[in-house]
Image (cartoon, rainbow, N blue to C red):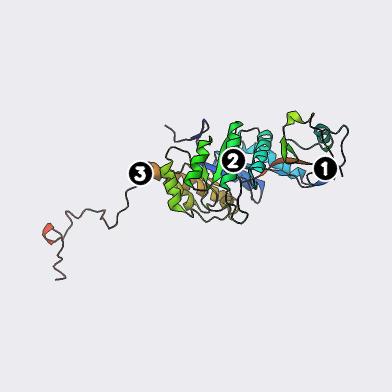
Amino acid sequence: MPLNVNGNPLPMPEPPTLENLLRLVQPQRPYAVARNEEFVPSSAYAKCKLVDGDRIEIVHPSAGG
Amino acid sequence: MPDTMTFYGQDYGSRILLGTARYESPVLLLEAIETAQPALLTVALRKQIQGGSQAGQSFWSILRSANRPLLPNTAGCNSAKEAVNTALMAREAFETDLIKLEVIGDEANLQPDPFGLLEAAAYLVKRGFKVLPYCTEDLILCRRLLDVGCEVLMPWAAPIGTGQGPRNPKALRELRDRLPDVPLIVDAGLGLPSHACQVMEWGFDGILVNTAVSRAIDPVRMAMAFAGAVQAGRGGFLAGPMPVQEFAVPSTPDIGRPFWDEAHRFMPQEIA
């Protein structure tokens, strides 16, 4: 599969940008994103081009100590 | 003048930082927060498991209703790179520059990795983060963290979640003595209110507690006990403890005691 999103295989969106992927996934806010273990700021979603094999992680507020 | 804890230009009326993990229910978490009145609430970032999106959303709702400032952490990160990227994500998701920086060096006791911690702290401070590093009580590490711009340090009492209380009291007290003007918050390993009271009596500025409250049989009552302990310990520190003596010193004066006079001070005739 072209993309791995939070451990799950997902097809590549068209055009292949992070913005388009998030439009499909529709994560609940607030959230933040890393691509291949590097943070991607929300201001860069539109220009962040995805390629086959990218690992996308979408994280949300959670309990912590 | 109010007795506040200050770092990164912010005054905090409370000296407790409270973790939000491992509560049996959201109601208990909210009641514990209301009772402890923490300066900051620690939170994390996690991927949502499939079908668990409702839980994530409700946690965010709970946090919002608690209406306390948040301190995101980088819990579980094993390298400076992971911690830095987690911090960057936390800043965006939680909209705060505050970060509780954890870089773990050992999986068994979750001991901070001083080298990765320092590297990540230096990077994040340069990018405008207000870093609260979870560190060991090593004086040189603490100095280096201050050198790279940390304004507050969070030395451990004992490994996370153990509830052992201060494992290395002499080193902790020495750290306090050597860094008298640096806000020091004891983080991790506190299990009892007396542990919190003890470190506050030693002059630490605050404590961070999670498991000791959330895994108590009655977390709300334990939150209240910790709040009282912190207040008592702080009061004891500010009041200035008496010096410890080797030998007994009677608190009630001998002079004027019946059946006693100066001549018989060391020779009780009854025995002779």
* Dots 2 and 3 on the same chain: yes
User: Is disc 1 on the same chain as disc 2?
Assistant: no
Instruction: Please tell me in which quadrant of the rendered image residue A60 appears.
Output: top right
Query: Residue B42 location in percent, x, y?
Result: 60, 42
Determine crowd level at label 1: few under 14, some 14-19, many 20+ residues with C-alpha closer than 10 A. few
The image quadrant where one finds the N terminus of chain B is: top left
Q: Of the residues tagged 2 and 3, which is closer to the observer?
A: 2
Kindly identify which residue carries mark 1: A53
The chain that hosts pointer 2 is B
Q: Are marks 1 and 3 on the same chain?
A: no
Q: CA distance from mark 1 to mark 3?
A: 63 Å
Marks 2 and 3 close (CB-CB < 8 Å): no
Whether residue B52 is visible to the viewer of this picture, yes or no, is yes
Mark number, residue B240: 3
Q: The disc numbered 1 marks a residue on which chain? A: A
Q: Residue at x 69, y 39 (%)?
A: B60
Place of residue A41 in the rendered image (x, y in percent of width and height, measured from the top left): 72, 32
